Amino acid sequence: MSLKTALERLGFGPCYHMIEVLKRPQDAAFWDEAADKVDRGERVNWDKVFSDYEATVDWPGCAFYRELVEAYPDAKVILSVRDPYKWYESVRATFLRGRDTAAPKPSLRRTLVFKVLRWVAPPMRNLYLMQRKVIFERSFHGHWLERDDAIGTFKKHMEEVMEFVPPERLLVYEVAQGWKPMCEFLGVEEPDEPFPHRNDAHEFRKIAMKRQMSATLAPMARAVAVLASLVLAA
C-alpha cells in the first residue's frame, strides 16, 4: 500500500492493487480468465483492465509479472523486497485472517458465508474464486500459505524476478529506502515530503469489509423484497 501511494504521488497513478478488485469485483472474471489463458499459452489483452491505470502493484498483477514485462516493453519494474517473516505476518493479517493455515479446508463459518455470498452476491463469489486460483494455487501452488512453504515461495519469487527482468528495467527496492532510489530510477523529482507509510493490513481489512457488506446487503434486500411480494401475492 505504501508503494501504491508513493507511485501515485509521483504521477504514476492510478495504480492497480488488490484493493481495486475489491472496489470493482467484476474485474475478478478478467483475472480468472487471464490465468486460464496464460496456462494455455494464449494472448491476454491486458489493456482491458489496465487502460485507466499507469502502474500495478500487489496481486493479482504480480502473479503475471513475466507476461506484463513482455506486454509492456517500455515499463519499468520495481521489485519490492522486505523481511520474509514480517511479510508473512502481514499476509496472515489479510488473506489468511480467520483461516487455519495448517489445513487447506476452510472453516465451517467461512463455508457458510461463501454459500450465502454465492446466492446473494455473485461478484463477491467470483472474487473469492479468483483469489484462490491466482494467489493460493498459481502463486503458492496450492500450499495455502503454510508458513515455511510461503516464505520459501516468497524468496524464490524474488530470485526469479531478478533473473527474468533485464537489469536496466529493474529496481530492487525496500520502502525503508524512501524516495531517492525510486525517483532516480523513474526519472522524476523527489517530493519534499515524507515517504508514505500505509498500514496495508488495516487498510485491506477495512475496505474488504466495506465492499463485502455493500455487495451482500443490496442483493439480499432485493431477494427479501421478492420473497415478500410472493408471500403477499399468495
Image (spheres, helix red, strand yellow):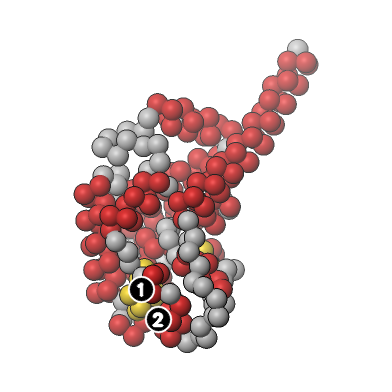
Using residue 142 as the reference point, say whether residue 120 is left or right of it: right
Rendered image: mark on residue 173? 1
Identify the mark nearer the N-term, 2 or 1.
1
Q: Disc count in the image? A: 2
| Residue for point 53% across, 30% down | 116
Which of these two is toward me, 10 or 128? 10
Q: State the SS at label 2.
A: helix
Q: Amino acid at mark 1?
A: Tyr
Instruction: Give percent across and percent down for residue 46.
Output: 48, 67
Quarter placement of the C terminus: top right
**Do we see residue 56 in this rendering?**
no
Mark 1 surroundings: few (<14), some (14-19) or many (≥20) residues within 10 A? some
| Residue for point 40% across, 69% down | 175
| Residue for point 49% across, 60% down | 198
Which of these two is toward me, 69 or 149? 149
Q: Are marks 2 and 1 in contact (CB under 8 Å)?
A: yes
**Do we see residue 174 in this rendering?**
yes
| Residue for point 64% across, 31% down | 220
Residue hosting label 2: 181
**Residue 227 lies in quadrant:** top right
Mark 2 surroundings: few (<14), some (14-19) or many (≥20) residues within 10 A? some
Above or below: residue 154 compared with residue 67: above
Above or below: residue 82 compared with residue 76: above
